[in-house]
Amino acid sequence: MDIAIQLYSVHTETEKDYKTAVAKVAEVGFQGVEFAGYGGLSADEMAAFLKENNLYSVGAHVGAERIRDSFLEELEYHKTIGSKYIICPYAPLKSVEEVKELAEVLNNAAKQAAGSGIKVGYHNHAHEFEVLDGKYALDLLAEYTNDDVILELDVFWAAYAGVDPLTYIKRLGKKIELIHMKQINEAKENVDMSEGCIDMKAIKDTAEYATHFVLEHEEYDKPIWDSIKNDYDFLSQI
């Protein structure tokens, strides 16, 4: 299993020393990274830094406003560093109209990315499983976006919302190309992979159309690098 990490998982460390923290991710064993900020590095600097540390870029979480207003600039950065995805990490989606507006932004961005080898998508939290007009907001977004706009399913937030991530993965099929591997316990806390309720092997086996599995870990009850290593070791064995 080729395991990537969303770098927000170690944001407290990247804020102290960006390059040292990302290099440590590689030392743990991760091969891919998903960005949440670039540490002030230019595209050429980032490409060289990734190569130096034997890492590749899955892509990045990029705000909806930047995707709407400055997408071509973002796209050029990711062409240079070899990314595969540009993902909107959050939108309120409190109404059908808001879902349609975001779908238009993502569809437009996907058209601009056509031929680049980079896809555009959306990453969920829990609120996208609120019902709008008889359907989950996330289902509506899947319907309103073109086939080349993908979803990055965060299994923690699906479970947090009371939705079985395995069932959801099966139902949306090819639309889900990225999986955020984030563990939850019965108290709805984010915990180490071995300490939670989600069967991550079943997630891996069920997500047959997923191109990348990306660890995300946001809450810690032990030293951060201990949890990250625990997660890596767990995921590398499933």
Image (tube, rainbow, N blue to C red):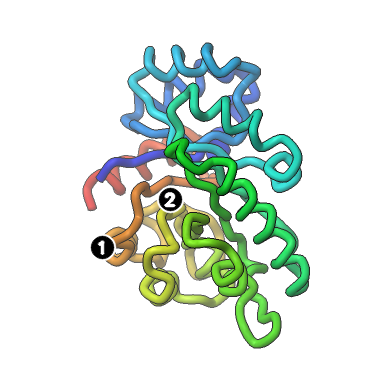
Question: In the image, what residue type sits under mark 2?
Answer: Asp
Between residue 81 and residue 33, name the one nearer to us: 81
Q: SS class of the residue under badge 1? A: helix
From the viewer's perspective, is the residue at label 1 or at label 2 nearer?
Answer: 1
Q: What residue is drawn where x is 34% and y is 49%?
A: 211
Q: Where residue 205 is drawn, which disc sits there?
A: 1
Q: Alpha-carbon neighbours of circle 1 within 10 Å: few (<14), some, or many (≥20)?
A: few
> Residue 108 location in percent, x, y?
64, 50
Circle 2 Cα neighbour tier, 10 Å, few/some/many (<14 / 14–19 / ≥20): many
Q: Residue at point 64% right, 33% down? A: 72
The amino acid type of the residue labelled 1 equals Asp
Q: Quadrant of residue 129?
A: bottom right
Is label 1 in contact with label 2 (beta carbons under 8 Å)?
A: no
Q: Nearer the viewer, residue 185 or 56?
A: 56
* Vertical relation: 48 (above or below) 88: above
The residue carrying mark 2 is 192
